[in-house]
Image (cartoon, coloured by chain):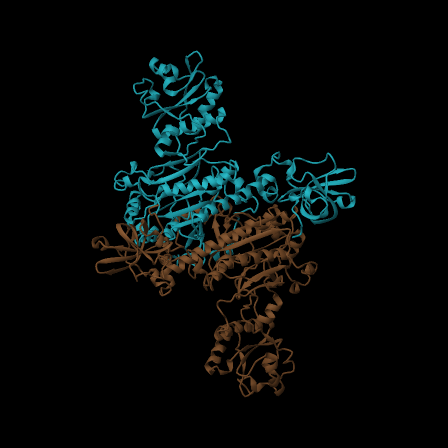
Chain colours: A cyan, B brown
Amino acid sequence: MLRTHKAGSLRAEHIGQTVTLTGWVDRRRDHGGVAFIDLRDASGIAQVVIRDEETAHPLRSEFVLKVTGEVSGRPEGNANDNLATGDIEVIATEVEVLNESAPLPFQVSTALDGQETVGEEARLKHRYLDLRRPAPARMLRLRSDAAQVARRVLNDAEFTEVETPTLTRSTPEGARDFVVPARLNPGSWYALPQSPQLFKQLLMVGGVERYYQLARSYRDEDFRADRQPEFTQLDIEMAFVDQEDVIALGEQLVSELWKLIDVQVPTPIERITFADAMRLYGSDKPDLRFGNPIVELAEYFADTTFRVFQQEYVGAVVYAGGASLPRRQFDAWQDWAKSRGAKGLAYVTFQEDGTLGGPVAKNLSDAERDGLAAITGAKPGDAVFFAAGSTTEAQALLGAARVEIAKQTGEINNKDWAFVWVVDAPMFKPTGSDPDDVDLGHSAWTAVHHAFTSPKPEHLDTFDKDPENALSYAYDIVCNGVEMGGGSIRIHRRDVQERVFEVMGIGEEEAQEKFGFLLDAFAFGAPPHGGIALGWDRTVSLLAGVDSIREVIAFPKTGNGFDPLTAAPAPITPEQRAEAGVDFVPEDEEA
Amino acid sequence: MLRTHKAGSLRAEHIGQTVTLTGWVDRRRDHGGVAFIDLRDASGIAQVVIRDEETAHPLRSEFVLKVTGEVSGRPEGNANDNLATGDIEVIATEVEVLNESAPLPFQVSTALDGQETVGEEARLKHRYLDLRRPAPARMLRLRSDAAQVARRVLNDAEFTEVETPTLTRSTPEGARDFVVPARLNPGSWYALPQSPQLFKQLLMVGGVERYYQLARSYRDEDFRADRQPEFTQLDIEMAFVDQEDVIALGEQLVSELWKLIDVQVPTPIERITFADAMRLYGSDKPDLRFGNPIVELAEYFADTTFRVFQQEYVGAVVYAGGASLPRRQFDAWQDWAKSRGAKGLAYVTFQEDGTLGGPVAKNLSDAERDGLAAITGAKPGDAVFFAAGSTTEAQALLGAARVEIAKQTGEINNKDWAFVWVVDAPMFKPTGSDPDDVDLGHSAWTAVHHAFTSPKPEHLDTFDKDPENALSYAYDIVCNGVEMGGGSIRIHRRDVQERVFEVMGIGEEEAQEKFGFLLDAFAFGAPPHGGIALGWDRTVSLLAGVDSIREVIAFPKTGNGFDPLTAAPAPITPEQRAEAGVDFVPEDEEA
């Protein structure tokens, strides 16, 4: 090593020792011809005192130095309690400039931690500078620590870590594949895996019994929201298990991971059925850091004369203290609702004197008005938002309103953690209900989780006769309203798998063509199995307390899959194109 | 769990307990109406006794069972000492068939361990069956264990594990890239990385200081030899280090890894210069499990009248006991040499009576004949092979002959381990000398390691004036004649990097276009850094004692990048092609 000590490791006990440090000039101050350099390495900062003006003269921010000197106690009153090395300084006797630095596009000094406001594009373009700053550096270390914790849990439980292929065949996860031309098989393409799903199931058939992998996965989706074209999953599969085993392992992982940030997660983690999650919170990933569940009012308004409420579904959420909101705020809520595809958001205010306000109130009967506080739980000073219409859409709107209200009222404590398992999801949903889905089959039904999810035992006989009401053996883990991961008990019988394909409109021939190898595998003694995958970027971002997964990815891409640092993707040359066989035409098809 | 115990865990201490096992029917024998089933799970085998004929009747090989019964001592004299569970058997009271199995394409029973001769194509097509066999299952576990060992060493040394992008920009490793069309940036393509080289250097510039990753990498090479289109590297980089630090870490990794197979690797590991490796062993990856170095004879034959030896280089290797080889063996050696592009392989035999045999002997002078035993070290009964011509080609031929001789004479002990560091490799080699190279530049010189390798300090000033003799700060670790990995101290100064590009014929503009982000990074205080990468598939195959890396890959591809299991790669649909933007033409270029 070019150094004898790490800068951040020096303490009073080192006083009198001659040390050599290496690192970057984090900050420089000059007093009376003496230069005080905060020298930074990955471990922290040490103050270096350079008395020789000629030596000190050229040193600027982010120069890379090798400094030899004696560790000395700081003069009386000059100790810096904010710095781990604040009791000492290094009196330089030798300073070597290992590398210089041009003036920076933005400051990276530790002294500015948290104060800088640099745009993301600039940060990513110069990510090698951004990573020198304390917060991004912490994120990378936290991500590394999290990986070690997860592996420790899994290795202790006798899992085998297996690397599965990434140049493979289209995997049926329901999103768009990235494809790679295969030069040696002209006209053929590999697909990058959307997950190791099929391979991990094949490993179970192969008797591996307990598999895991921090697996790179790929989905060619439109990069709305916080998505990346490549992402990482902590991918897990187990043979001879039922749902309880996988959930128990998931809870162990979560509780060990959260210990990294000194949070004790109480286990067992609460569970809620998919149906209840939708009914009470209008979401399959309910944020349970706060209450305020949706109140169903269809029965309450069964005989209403108010046309707006004469619907399949009527529900409401309370806005505590909402009665005093100014009118323009309620108008903003209308816009908010319209931006989500709703017509608007009906509301009623409960005045302190017991009267009801808002445009809806006058449309209600006396009885409807009188009972409203009791049935919704609203108190004087509150407001209540209503949604009416199809159950699914109205619940979703109320669920979103519930979260938005909590944000506005400050009900969410950022230090709170609310984990919940969402279980008993439906097996199927109507095809086309999610714009990001690539439908595998050709029927009115597509899989909610994926095509390999087992029906619950009580739906095993009926799921194909009554797909709408079939429940799956699936479980999602939700943290603070964010889906961290999910899994299921899988189908392990060929006949059941074929029936699921049939519901999805995947005929026998097509199934054999696309997934024949899996169906074949099921014919040779596939064990019962199930698993889970944690979205690793999301999990680490939750641990790190950041909103965007980009903060916990070393070299993330921006919205449309562009990397501002390397300027990837980029055009390829005609030679590369020809060589890759992109334009291969079989001889008998040539014009 | 569907079971209470693992099959392989049962011992005499469990006698009397009621247990539930799950697993596969490994073997079935019937005696007097009683079925004896070897039930196999990942932990091993337990004998299950089924007395009820009706229950036992349908059970065939690889059926998946759940068996409940009482653990019982085997009857006197029936214990099986070859089986960890050989003292007990489980008397079944309940047998549930969890899944059936069709007749197998090949047998997987543990009882046949090592006896089966199944073709690789069949094994890979039914890899989920192959993995149930003991040897392939052991390989996967060994690979998993090796990963944990490596990570333990690196985590203990305060390395940060960082995931780098795989949808990225062409990386200049000198092989062909796999490319991926970027739908959201039509006409642009990502490249899959040949290694994380540039990103790990950027992490060093970013102050990460110690990075590692088990990184998936991709090279679109012709799949001659034992190569895979995707492979794994244990990728490591460190800041503020010199060659000694990286070598010390490499030795620690190797010695911890080899403990997995109970081998103590003596450290420090021997080092040899690239020049000596070529001179003595005719290879940059010499197998040092045996001696028999090449003898240089150009000086010895300086005045020879034998035209064949009037060359820049003459050398020889001894074939101990080779004098007694039949003539057809020597003929076969000629073919062997021709298949390697040589004209033939001159040889002399040393008869027990002191005379020389073979076609070359008569062309030598008396003095040349008389001194030959002394200078080559040949003893009566030995043969000596000669090569003459250009130094590089003749050394390579003799090096290959040396290895082939050792194989034929049984000099290689498969239990031996010979590690060696090959250091001081040249920086540059003539362009076009390796058919798999994709030349980055446009000059007569290309990089031996890669363009980011630092010259040795003593060549820093001269490498561009005298590229032929410039040595690099590079080190390869070789085990038993196989290159396990390699690395180098990198260039960290922009001016040096630009000079290297210049030698390779990469002009300023092209360098900025291709690697501008790295050159820019170097301008902002890049620290001195270096690293190493171990070819992980190769490392694990050495540990496992298998010749092919395919044996230690869960789902390997065959020679031309084809996966017999999933039949990847495969054609894509015209819709996929259109959507991926493969045929995108910018508007102003449209016909």
B163 with respect to A364 (left or right): right
Q: Is residue A126 visible?
A: yes
x, y percentage for residue A86?
Answer: 68, 38
Q: Is residue A231 visible?
A: no
x, y percentage for residue B506?
Answer: 62, 56
Q: Looking at this view, is B293 or B389 the one in front?
A: B293
A221 with respect to B158 (left or right): left
* Number of dots carrying numbers: 0
Q: Looking at this view, is A465 or A508 the one in front?
A: A465
Q: Residue at x 46, y 59 (%)?
A: B228
| The quadrant where residue A15 appears | top right
The residue at the far front in this view is B76
A425 with respect to B240 (left or right): left
x, y percentage for residue A504?
Answer: 31, 43
B259 with respect to A529 (left or right): right
The residue at the far top in this view is A353
x, y percentage for residue B15?
Answer: 32, 52
Quadrant containing the C terminus of chain A is: bottom left
Location of residue B395 with respect to B135 vertically, above or below: below
| The quadrant where residue A305 appears | top left
